[in-house]
Image: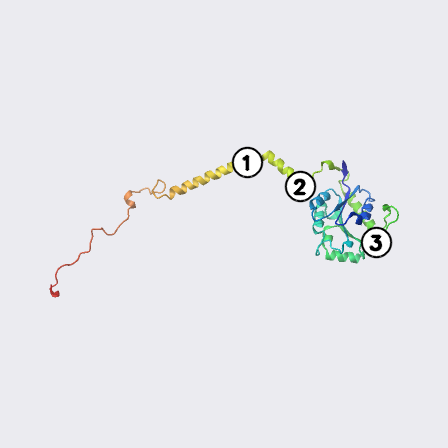
Amino acid sequence: MMAYKHVVGIFSRDTRDAFDWLDRFLLTIPGVNDVRTIHITNTNYIEVMEEAYKCTFAILYHSKNRGRINVADVTDALYDKELDDLSRCLGRDRVIVVIDDVEDSCLEAKNNILQKQPSIGRLTIELYLFGDQDKNYQGEASNFTGNKLVHMKRLISGKINKDHRPETSVNMDNYVPYTDKSRKNIIGFLKNYGVMIFGIIVVLVIVAVVISCNRYTENWTTTAGYPTTSNMPTTWHPESSLPKTTHHPTNFTSVDTTPNPGNGT
């Protein structure tokens, strides 16, 4: 199965029904071969990023019907990490944010959101606000005429046309997730060089043991209680180690025993 890289991904915590109109609109853009819908939860981060690597362009979709506009940089933001990772994965100029079901979709409302949630402007190329009047169309999806939709169409088409990857294709049957590739590379490296690495470790251990033994032997010989060839002086004599005394044991202090005539003896 061959899949071209002109793929737009819609990343959202909302169900597909909420942005079905956006899905149909994206398929009218020349060069878009597929639109993927990636549902974000609190536990499927790896799957979301694997899908991101398959996309040429990403749209982060949020509906105000969830309660409020809390995409990033605010309390209980829903997409802080996803927004940052999509931007790093695809590049800032290939990520846009769509906020749907707003009461006010004017430029002032847009600027107010960008001011309070600056990561949107820093990590994506555009923010679109859509109310009911902004996504009205007649007939087929190709008849979208709203100014914002026209602008979005031109933006995505321009990025696709500048991409040098359209003529190439990727065989999805051979696709291996990034985490699996890393694991297989490590296993392959260990198979090829495991014996050599083990041998080096053994040699290092032996060298360390020999050095430790030599140091222990040297310390023992220099601290022993008896003189050895390594610690005795060149003019050593057994008597030189005897303690020197200032008095001989036979020397006694003399006592005068001559009688004194004046003491009555």
Residue 218 appears at what percent x and percent y? 41, 41
Marks 3 and 1, the one that precedes in the sequence: 3
Left or right, 160 with reference to 197:
right
Image disc number at residue 61: none
Question: In percent of the image, x 38 and y 43: which residue is there?
Answer: 222
Image disc number at residue 179: 2
Question: In percent of the image, x 46 and y 39: which residue is there?
Answer: 211
Marks 2 and 3, the one that precedes in the sequence: 3
Image disc number at residue 132: 3
Callout 1: SS = helix
Callout 2: SS = helix
Left or right, 17 with reference to 249:
right
User: Crowding at label 3, few (<14), some or many (≥20) Cα neighbours within 10 Å?
Assistant: few
User: Crowding at label 1, few (<14), some or many (≥20) Cα neighbours within 10 Å?
Assistant: few
Nearest the eye: 142 or 44: 44
Q: Which residue is mark 1?
A: 198
Question: In percent of the image, x 78 and y 54: which residue is there?
Answer: 65
Quarter of the image with the N terminus in it: top right
Q: Amino acid at mark 3?
A: Asp
Q: Amino acid at mark 2?
A: Thr
User: Could you tell me how far apart the alpha carbons at marks 3 and 1 are, in whole angstroms?
Assistant: 67 Å
Nearest the eye: 175 or 67: 67
